[in-house]
Image (spheres, helix red, strand yellow):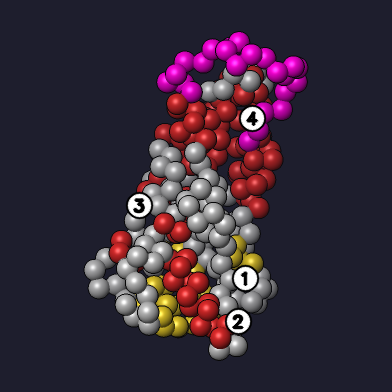
Amino acid sequence: MRITIEAWRQPNHDADGHFETYVVDDATAEMSLLEVLDRLNEDLVAQGVEPIAFDSDCREGVCGACGMMVNDRPHGPTPNTPSCRQHLRHFPPNTTTLKLEPLRAKSFPVVRDLVVDRSALDRVIEAGGHVAINAGQATDADGTLTPHDTSEQSLDYAACIGCGACVAACPNGAAHLFAGAKLLHLAATTYGRQERGRRARAITGQMEQDFGPCSTYGECADVCPAGIELNAVAAVNREAMRFGFRRKPD
């Protein structure tokens, strides 16, 4: 396969960026997007050209590091699939051009080429995406029973990998799907629910500083590699209102 790649090149955050066009002559349908970039970078290095910088780690759809815009869509054409698992065979027939650029969101400044700084998501976690109570000694695993359905639901929301695709997909750059997943995950756990009110105030407060308001369009759920459902978005306002009515953290 002959694939034309229009890649965003930007040496640093302060420099102006632009698209450059490259060609990979020996791509195969089994290649993932990252493997195509690997092949292109091999050619660029051999030619003495600076390779395209992009994030990746596990390449198994677990870490969320590989997020990028592919033909104007976060991650690529296949819904709920990260960039590292997007293979050329999954693209529409006769696709010969790939437009690759960094995740587009005001809260994700470009570091270099396709690499962005997603520290804004880390700040949300630092604000309240954790359990911080004195639990004392470790108790027996069956000391506090949790219904099976509750545990499964909590794990479903814990599956969020923090890739930032939901933010890039939203016209307003909102992070409600991400924040809601954290709130619902921890609210269902035995110790996590003890900080439910404080956590809701902290997470929503930090989120509003760095991200935009929810657009209510639902693009975020369509691109989420973890398949987080839209009810996580509704949880943000619901948890914040719950805290307001109770007037104090749990």
Please tell me whether residue 18 belongs to the stretch shown in magenta. no
Residue 79 image label: 3
Q: Which tag is nearer the camera, tag 2 or tag 1?
A: 2
Q: Amino acid at mark 4?
A: Arg
**Which quarter of the figure is the N terminus placed in?**
bottom left
Give the alpha-carbon distance from disc 2 to disc 1, as whole Å.
Answer: 12 Å
Compared with 185, 106 (above or below) is below
* Residue 183 appears in the figure: yes
Query: Residue at the location (63% across, 59% down)?
Result: 117
Q: CA distance from mark 1 to mark 3?
A: 26 Å
Q: Position of residue 126 (x, y in %)?
A: 69, 40
Nearer the observer: mark 2 or 4; the answer is: 2
Whether residue 71 sits left or right of residue 196 in the image: it is: left
Quick one: SS at disc 2? loop
Q: Nearer the viewer, mark 4 or mark 3?
A: 3
Nearer mark to the viewer, of 4 and 1:
1
Q: CA distance from mark 2 to mark 4?
A: 44 Å
Q: Which residues are magenta?
A: 129-151
Asked if residue 171 shows in the view, the reply is no
Q: Position of residue 247 (x, y in %)?
A: 65, 20
Q: Which residue is mark 2?
A: 50
Which label sits on residue 112? 1
Residue 165 vs 137, above or below: the answer is below
